[in-house]
């Protein structure tokens, strides 16, 4: 396929990549704008025109799979560019001699960075993750006459280092261009529908995910203090909703095992255990099931939680107890990176719904619920910072918050009286169900 055909598939907003001579070409925007595809296609075109050394860079690259290597391979296959030879760690044009190399910046010392001195074009993917330290090392290294640095990014915060250094007040050698899904004629209809749905349901998320606007100060938090404090106010006296229990099980010495009791819009209470082994936690949970007859117990199956789950299942509580892996696939995989992000966002939605909700007034709970930072992956899916990161900042594990969000693991509907089969126990109605149904 010739270069003209490929160029025709690159949205016009990206034309300066091929036509303008600028030291920095800085493209930012939201999901669906086609930045990565346009950069890859443009570089493949330029690499067919003359010999270039093109460095594809990220802040962190543990393996070649973390780079844009795969994207370039896919575009070569899509256009059937037989002049490109794909090797294990690089891509070479057999006619011009152009070479694509792939590196992470964070782990590069000054000697390794010097290998980039002959680079003609450096493509920085996910520019929002690049630190000032990495940029200060890289920028003077890309020193060849007429060399260029191409940056593609989705802005996260107002103070993203590269934005502040390069794009906030660009000089005459810097091109800054915003591109969004509506600028991309090849944006799939499905993405357009998702964007419109997000615009209607969550305008703030729409501005960030789809229009590329940075998160405002404080907007990096998933749950706001205002929504939690509003839920502290007593407003619900009783409820007939089924009881759901979230059980976050201690993994380390200072962590706590926490039970959260929630019925519909009313979070009733928390119960806490310290330094209990798996058998003791299972015994305590069995007592709660017998005493309260919950519709579901959702427990964190990570770490020692798997042992507690196995004990409860062996005792006959399969119909009630559910093992939840925070790192597992989300039910709505198109919106969330994992189950943890999904449960936390369900909890956020519960706290902010129009109908009144209520939780016990607890400052520790408020701190934990409002401690988690959010961001979005390259597919626009919600991703939360790790529990270890939260623990490091708080000085403790957010056990109460995790127990609370576990109650949102799956929808639970009121299907009538709860049956308790554990250890051979059944409700009295079930003992005589056969005789009721017989004709004798």
Image (cartoon, rainbow, N blue to C red):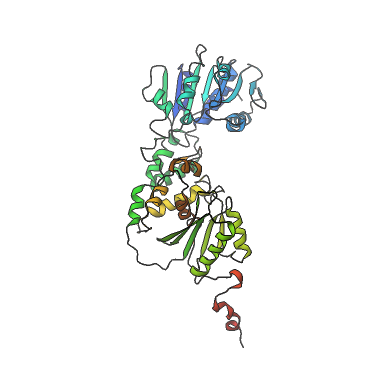
**Nearer the observer, 180 or 266:** 266
Residue 242 in sight from this viewpoint: yes
Quadrant position of residue 66: top right
Which quadrant, please, contains the C terminus? bottom right
Measured as percent of width and height from the top left, residue 180 is found at: 43, 34
Quarter of the image with the N terminus is: top right
Residue shown at 35%/64% (left/top)?
236
The residue at 53%/19% (across/down) is 121
Q: Horizontal placement of 176 versus 280: left or right?
A: left
Examine the image and state in which quarter residue 217 appears.
top left
Question: For this rendering, which residue is in front, 422 or 132?
Answer: 422
Can residue 189 be seen by looking at this rendering?
A: no
Residue toward you, 365 or 156: 365
* Residue sitting at the far top: 145
Horizontal side of residue 58 vs 93, given as left or right: left
Place residue 261 in its image quadrant.
bottom left
- Residue occupying image coordinates x 66% and y 19%: 94
**Please, is residue 137 above or below residue 226 in the view?**
above
How many callouts does the rendering have? Answer: 0
């Amino acid at each position: 396929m010739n270069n003209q055909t490929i160029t025709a598939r690159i949205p016009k907003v990206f034309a300066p990549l091929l036509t303008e001579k600028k030291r920095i070409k800085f493209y930012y925007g939201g999901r669906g704008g086609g930045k990565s595809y346009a950069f890859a296609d443009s570089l493949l075109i330029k690499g067919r025109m003359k010999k270039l050394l093109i460095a594809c860079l990220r802040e962190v690259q543990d393996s070649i799979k973390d780079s844009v290597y795969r994207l370039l391979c896919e575009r070569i296959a899509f256009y059937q560019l037989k002049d490109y030879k794909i090797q294990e760690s690089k891509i070479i044009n057999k006619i011009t001699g152009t070479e694509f190399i792939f590196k992470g910046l964070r782990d590069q010392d000054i000697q390794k960075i010097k290998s980039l001195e002959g680079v003609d074009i450096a493509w920085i993917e996910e520019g929002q993750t690049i630190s000032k330290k990495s940029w200060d090392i890289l920028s003077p290294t890309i020193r060849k006459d007429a060399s260029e640095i191409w940056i593609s990014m989705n802005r996260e915060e107002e103070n993203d280092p590269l934005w502040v250094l390069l794009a906030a007040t660009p000089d005459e050698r810097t091109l800054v261009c915003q591109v969004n899904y509506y600028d991309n004629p090849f944006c799939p209809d499905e993405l357009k529908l998702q964007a419109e749905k997000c615009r209607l349901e969550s305008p703030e998320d729409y501005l960030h995910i789809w229009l590329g606007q940075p998160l405002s100060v404080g907007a990096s938090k998933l749950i706001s203090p205002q929504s939690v404090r509003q839920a502290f106010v007593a407003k619900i006296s009783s409820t007939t909703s089924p009881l759901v229990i979230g059980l976050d099980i201690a993994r380390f010495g200072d962590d706590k095992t926490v039970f959260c009791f929630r019925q519909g819009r009313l979070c009733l209470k928390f119960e806490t255990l310290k330094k209990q082994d798996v058998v003791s936690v299972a015994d305590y949970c069995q007592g709660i099931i017998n005493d309260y007859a919950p519709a579901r117990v959702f427990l964190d199956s990570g770490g020692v939680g798997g042992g507690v789950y196995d004990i409860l299942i062996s005792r006959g509580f399969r119909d009630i107890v559910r093992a939840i892996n925070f790192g597992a696939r989300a039910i709505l995989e198109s919106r969330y990176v994992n189950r943890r992000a999904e449960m936390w966002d369900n909890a956020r939605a519960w706290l902010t719904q129009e109908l009144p909700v209520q939780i016990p007034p607890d400052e520790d709970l408020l701190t934990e619920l409002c401690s988690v930072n959010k961001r979005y992956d390259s597919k626009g899916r919600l991703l939360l910072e790790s529990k270890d990161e939260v623990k490091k900042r708080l000085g403790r594990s957010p056990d109460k918050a995790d127990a609370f969000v576990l109650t949102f693991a799956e929808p639970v509907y009121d299907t009538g009286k709860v049956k308790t089969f554990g250890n051979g126990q059944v409700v009295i109605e079930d003992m005589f169900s056969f005789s009721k149904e017989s004709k004798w």
